[in-house]
Amino acid sequence: MGADIKSLRNRIKSVDSTLHLTRAMGLVASSKIRRAMDHMNKGRQYEAAVRAAIEPLLHSPDCQRSPYMRTAPKQEGQERVCLIVIAGDRGLAGGYNANVFRALQDYPDADMIAIGKRACDRFGDEALRAEGFDYTTALGMAIELCRDFADGKYDKIGILCTHYVSMLSQEVQLRWLFPLQPTEHAPAGSVIFEPDEVTILNAAIPEYVAGILISAVRESFACEIAARRTAMDSAGKNAQEMIDRLQLQYNRARQGAITQEITEIVAGSGM
């Protein structure tokens, strides 16, 4: 009985220590979420602005000659694919990282470019953290991606990231960067481009890709923070419930030990 009481006491201390850790991590995530959401919204606005700027060009017949709009003649499954994989910098974020890596199973032969420490560790790349990912880094990566696609190194280039739906819901999505695809409806109004549409489009594409990259990284980081806060809240509740159950078992075991001692004393005094 004494061994059971000691074991329960040790388990309560261990779970209580975990509870303090989850609460601390939840508070850190809560302190970061507002700033992450603000950066995410600004990234979305910038992406929408650069998309609106090039949308008239994508509907131009002359721009169909751009190397960024070429369509690979190969059959599906034979394309040379490159994916920019955006994962988290840390763990303990529920299924955030696992969901991203699970989506990669559909592209086993694709070349990977990792953003986020967890993705870099998985693919053996130099650590490129999602937190602090700036526009200079995004533009340098965009220029290299544009060069690779224009030179024919890849037939498709996409971003595997996480889309923010709400604090409780984040969805993994694959967004194709190349080849460029215009929307179904052409924008209203007419614009005259100098010197010509193709030149303007080719010059604007690196800025456009950089805008999408920075927006995707910021949105994925906001999803990581939201997922971690949700996971820590859930872990904290589960830990508290476990402590309550263990405390009840501890009290019963302690009461049983005291009852047994009293019974032994009474029985000994009657002899």
Image (cartoon, grey):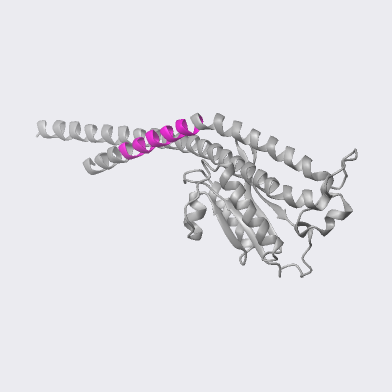
Q: Which residue is drawn at the image coordinates 48% and 37% (left, top)?
A: 232
The number of discs equals 0
Q: Identify whether 241 is placed above or below 82.
A: above
Horizontal relation, residue 33 to residue 213: left or right: left
Place of residue 36 in the rendered image (x, y in percent of width and height, measured from the top left): 56, 34
Instruction: Reply above or below: 231 against 65.
Output: above
Across and down, in percent, residue 76 comes to: 75, 67
Q: Nearer the viewer, residue 211 or 228?
A: 211
The quarter in which the N terminus is drawn is: top left
Identify the residue at image location x=70%, y=66%: 152
For the C terminus, give its image quadrant: top left
Was residue 88 drawn as part of the magenta stretch in this picture? no
Measuring from the top left, give residue 156's x and y in whole percent.
70, 60
Range of the magenta residues?
Answer: 13-30
Q: Which quadrant holds residue 185?
A: top right
Left or right: 102 as drawn, with respect to 262? right
Up-down relation of residue 186 to residue 68 (above or below): above
When asked about the image quadrant of residue 224, the answer is: top right
Residue lying at the far front in this picture: please name it.
195
Q: Is residue 121 left or right of residue 192?
A: left
Observer-nearest residue: 259 or 186? Answer: 186
Residue placed at 61% from the left, 40% from the top? 219
Main secondary-structure element of the magenta-colored stretch: helix
Inspect the magenta stretch and tell me whether residue 28 lies in it.
yes
- Residue 162 left/right relative to 270: right
Residue drawn at (18%, 34%), measured in percent from left and top? 261
| Residue situated furthest right in the rendering | 189
Residue 138 at x, y = what percent?
60, 47
Out of 180 and 109, give the one closest to the viewer.
180
